[in-house]
Amino acid sequence: MSKIREEVITANQGYASSFGAKSDLALPPARRFAILTCMDARLDPAKYAGLSEGDAHVVRNAGGRATDDAIRSLVISHKLLGTLEWFVVHHTNCGMELFADEVMADLLDDDLGTASFDGKTWSNPHHHGGHAAGHFIKWHTIKSQETSVAQDVRRIREHPLVPKSIPIYGYVYDVRTGRLNEVKAASEAGVAAA
Ligand SMILES: [Zn+2]
């Protein structure tokens, strides 16, 4: 077993051994809200938003973008599981600011191994031949956090399957301070209709 796999299984045994009353948690989130946020390893929504098991839905992807699949989850979150307020949380120093679609597609076309970033450009350490499929994917990169949060809140707000009654709040999490800073333009776009 790989070292990481062993660590994960050991950690899980510890967690399960003191699972206690969590076995009785209901399926619908008790505090009736959802967060869409980035997969960045430095972000822990349970900690930055004060969540316990059973409290809220957390939908994560690269960038915390309002992709079709993120919207699918949010619609299920409300329609079947009763959430009533949503947060979109992007963050400073996001990896999604560090490349453009063509860059990613070209890197993948050349090699599938992990590329390296010198602070300015990405390069592949090997050139074993990748695949052109990356040219057909929209990678949802970010140019400015404030703009991306506002765009995503607006996209969710305008989606035909999202009820106007759900307020959608836009925030940027600061990775240097742990603080959530509101993006006014986003929250204004996400205001619920009475
Ligand atoms: Zn990120």
Image (tube, rainbow, N blue to C red):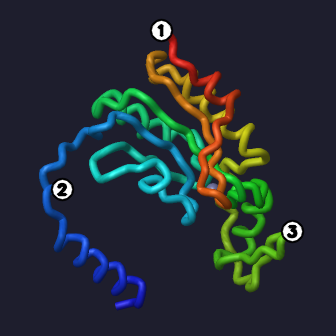
Q: Residue 83 is drawn in which quadrant?
A: top left
The answer to whether marks 2 and 3 mark residues whose Cβ atoms lie closer than 8 Å is no
- Label 2 element class: helix
Residue 49 screen position, x and y as percent: 46, 48
Element under disc 3: loop
- Amino acid found under the numbered disc labelled 1: Ala
Q: What residue type is labelled 2?
A: Lys
Residue at which label 3 appears: 120
Mark earlier in primary sequence (2, 1): 2
**Residue 172 occupies quadrant:** top right
Q: Position of residue 94 (x, y in %)?
A: 68, 57
Viewer-nearest of discs 2 and 3:
2
- Mark 3 is on which residue type? Lys
Residue, far right: 120
User: Which corner quadrant of the image does residue 89 belong to?
Assistant: top right
| Side of 100 where 2 appears, left or right | left
Is tag 2's residue or tag 3's residue first in the polypeptide sequence? 2
Distance CA(mark 3)–CA(mark 1):
47 Å
Mark 2: few, some, or many residues within 10 Å (few <14, many ≥20)? few
Sort mark 1 into few (<14), some (14-19) or many (20+) by Cα contacts within 10 Å: few
**Structural distance between the alpha carbons of marks 2 and 3:** 46 Å
Rendered-image quadrant of the N terminus: bottom left
Say which residue label 2 marks: 22
Which residue appears at 74% of the width and 85% of the height?
Answer: 126
Q: Is residue 127 above or below residue 70?
A: below
Q: Residue 194 carries which label?
A: 1
Q: Which residue is drawn at 54% across and 59% down?
A: 43
